[in-house]
Amino acid sequence: MSPTAVLVSCAELPSGDGDDDAVVPALSSLGFSVSWAPWDSSFDFASADAVILRATWDYPDRRAEFLAWCESVPSLLNPAPVVRWNTDKSYLVELLDAGLPVVPTTLVPLGSPASFPSSDFVVKPAVGAGSRGAARFAGGADASSHVAALHASGRAALIQPYQSSVDTDGELALVYLGGIYSHAFTKGAMLGSTVDGSGLYLSEKLAPASPPLDAVALAEDVLDAATALLGILRAELLYARVDLVRGADGKPLLLELELTEPSLGFRQTDPAAVTRFASAVRQQLA
């Protein structure tokens, strides 16, 4: 009997945003029976051999419900403890404390006052996806209102100094499959971009990339540190996307580590990447 794989989405984008279209035939070619289903649908997820989070981009407003669903799915990829840790961006503070070069990040818990850098900075929700709720500021008055609005919605806030390299170089995303480097792509500056028609994320300008050695080295360090904090092996992650920017000194900094539902840039890389993805799914079942 063929193993079953379910690509998990949300009601607004039941078949994803198109980036995973080639994943279905790739999984099918390796013997899987494949389907899409929103996470909060009536699909029998417990019966599937591999339940793969791909486009669950409505979770920020329903995180507790989403995490409870994740805990109920035996074959979730990536697994529920990883999702719980990664869907709250305060993990960046943990990675900072572990000694990694992370964009300086200050967590502002609910009810706590905020202090702001003297130069341009970004305020974003600790729980969020697709850059929704992130905004750039040059002063504290409007930023205080933004933090207050995030707190009123029940979300803590993160404050980070704005990295000007984003304006010229954008972000560099390195993709790992089964703990092994697969490919990379760039993302243009997103602050100020328009919201996609689904309302779930800001539109992105993506392009293929060949990452420099210092970026690869940092991505490797980030994955090793994160999996150590989680108490798992890198191979236990079906996928990971490490988003980097250049700091003022030109050295790479971690902006985000995406382990839950990131776009993996399959449309920006070689066609064999989806085969590597399908092979990594089989590895998870071994």
Image (cartoon, helix red, strand yellow):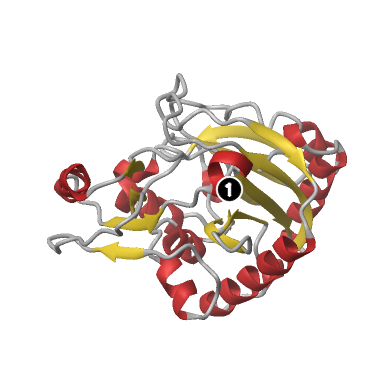
Tell me which amino acid carries mark 1: Ser
Question: As rendered, which of 34 and 185 lies closer to the eye?
Answer: 185
Residue 179 in view in this figure:
no
Which quadrant, please, contains the C terminus? Answer: bottom right
- Point out residue 234 in the picture as x, y percentages from the top left corner: 68, 70
Residue at 58% x, 57% y: name it.
78
View extreme (top): residue: 197
When asked about the image quadrant of residue 268, the answer is: top right
- Point out residue 224 in the picture as x, y percentages from the top left corner: 64, 75
Residue at 53% x, 37% y: name it.
189
- Point out residue 153 in the picture as x, y percentages from the top left corner: 19, 45
Q: Is residue 231 above or below residue 13?
A: below
Which quadrant, please, contains the N terminus? Answer: top right
When asked about the image quadrant of residue 16, the answer is: top right
Q: Where is mark 1, residue-wise?
A: 47
Question: As rendered, which of 144 and 286 lies closer to the eye?
Answer: 144
Residue at 40% x, 56% y: name it.
161
Tell whether 116 sits left or right of 105: left
Question: As rendered, which of 56 and 172 lies closer to the eye?
Answer: 172
Residue at 76% x, 53% y: name it.
211
